[in-house]
Amino acid sequence: MEQIPRSEGTTNSERYLAKLADRTFLNLWSYPNVHRDVIVNGQRSGKEICDLLVVCGNNVIIFSDKTVKWPKNDDVNVAWPRWYKKAVKKSVHQIRGAERWIEQNPDHIFLDNVCTKNLPIKLPPRDTRKVYGVVVAHGAHKECNTFFGRDSGSFMIQTSLQGDAHMKPSSSDFSPFTIGDVEPSGSFIHVLNEVSLEILMKELDTVTDFVDYLEHKAVFARSGNLNCSAGEEELLAYYLTHMIDNDRHGFIHPENRQWKPDEKFNLSAGHYEGLVRNAQYKNKIKADKNSYFWDRLIEAFTNHMLSGTAIVPDGSPFKVAEHEIGIRYMAQEPRISRRWYSDGFLEMLQMANQKDRTFRCMLPSQEQLRNETGYAFLTLAYPRVELEGGYEQYRQVRITMLYAVCMGMLRKCRWVKRIIGIATEPTLISGGPTITSEDIGMVEQPIEWTPRREAEIDKLCNHLDILKDDRVNTSNSGVEEYPR
């Protein structure tokens, strides 16, 4: 298996964006400076599609990053249109071009400028694909801060401002350092600067949390109900503190009723500052610390995939597009779910040091909206006697046991569509192997549970002495996003 080359960005701002993206979207699904192949003078050459492309599940995020110095002009009504044209409008043009290329040539996206290394992740099918455009415009936040006289320096949002009116002081909606709907003829494009980018990717640091916000914001911005917001962070604070239902944030009415068609909503400054000072928000930050174990667990697998050192047990060729599916489901878990799963896995690892084998299965309830994927965690100690097949024999037994646990739980919990299984050894033992490893696998509900299939799983579980009813304890648990 070859190493997968990933650009680190070509400018300081692109490198910073790539670093933030690795933290939020994780490295296997985030690719800076991807290219398309073009023919120039009869020669195949590469042309950059966008500054960062994120592909994870059905989600495709196109980032265009521009750093433009603020024009040396004392008249802000002259300087802002000049800066906007170079920093924002040019990026919008790049995003529209990237959208067209992805639509027409999804198999012609490359990691290098000579177009020899294909994007290793397959783009989702057209009918399920969700594409989001994000402009990151650097170079004006200090002037923005001075103009509005506030600390953050993020752009004001005013939805009535559309298209080229951003650059026309004669327009009735024109206002410097204010962003509305920059390209109303197509999908909504989000415009951030260095301040709002960092805040969004700090607060929404999973791909699901991030795109959920973008989607709800786009709908709200074009609904006619959002009039203006003092900044992106104020809109974000409102979103994070209001729930559509038990599982989803959203822009619900302050009085918890339907928006009227002619209602106009305005958000003043101070909402985000109030959020980060709130005691429950601080409790959330503390409670989330363990959740980053989930991120590191994902990277334990993706780092091997990117470096070309991943191993397939049956010896078949390794293809990222085929083997990333199970880990991708892990990467699509929102932060609050990662907290729950991490707490459960870490607790099991503590117990594992006292036992030869342990397992814990964590499944969403039937009532949860995101209830398709469950997880099974297994530890199996290396035996204290020498195995004829050595460590590989031990690992094969562990993989078989993991498969049996996952299938056995799928049989019991038919509402779950799939289970991701992860297995490892508890600790190194004296005189045993000096290495550790992790195995991951995914099983999905069969089309039909035939008597023969059920009998096969029962036989395997009995042979391995697992999932006996008298030894399996069940309980209901959950987490509060903002603990009191």
Image: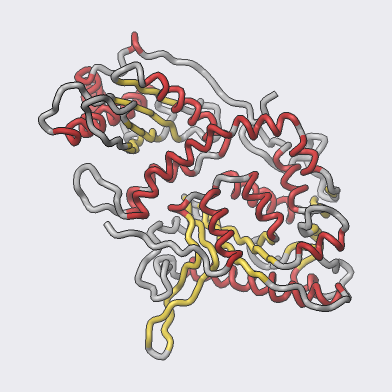
Q: Say above or below: 453 vs 239.
A: above
> Which residue is pictured at 52% across the width and 65% down the height?
9
Q: Residue 77, located in which quarter of the rendered image?
A: bottom right
Question: Is 232 displayed left or right of 340 in the figure?
Answer: right
- Colour scheme of the rendered structure: secondary structure
Question: Is 399 displayed left or right of 413 in the figure?
Answer: left
**Which residue appears farthest toward the top when viewing the image?**
470
> Which residue is pictured at 30% across the width and 28% down the height?
428
> Which residue is pictured at 60% across the width and 30% down the height?
287
Q: Residue 248, located in which quarter of the rendered image?
A: top right
x and y percent of residue 49 in the render?
A: 51, 71
Q: Say above or below: 86 vs 264.
A: below
**Which residue appears farthest toward the front when viewing the image?**
430
Q: Say above or below: 92 vs 386.
A: below
Total marks drawn? 0
x and y percent of residue 127 in the render?
A: 48, 56
**Which residue appears farthest toward the left when viewing the image?**
388
Quadrant in the picture for the N terminus: bottom left
x and y percent of residue 156 in the render?
A: 80, 58
Question: Is 262 displayed left or right of 135 in the figure?
Answer: right
Judge whether residue 157 can be spotted in this image.
no
> Which residue is pictured at 71% across the width and 56% down the height?
195
Q: Say above or below: 164 vs 257.
A: below
Quadrant in the picture for the C terminus: top right
Judge whether residue 363 can be spotted in this image.
yes
x and y percent of residue 401 in the render?
A: 26, 27
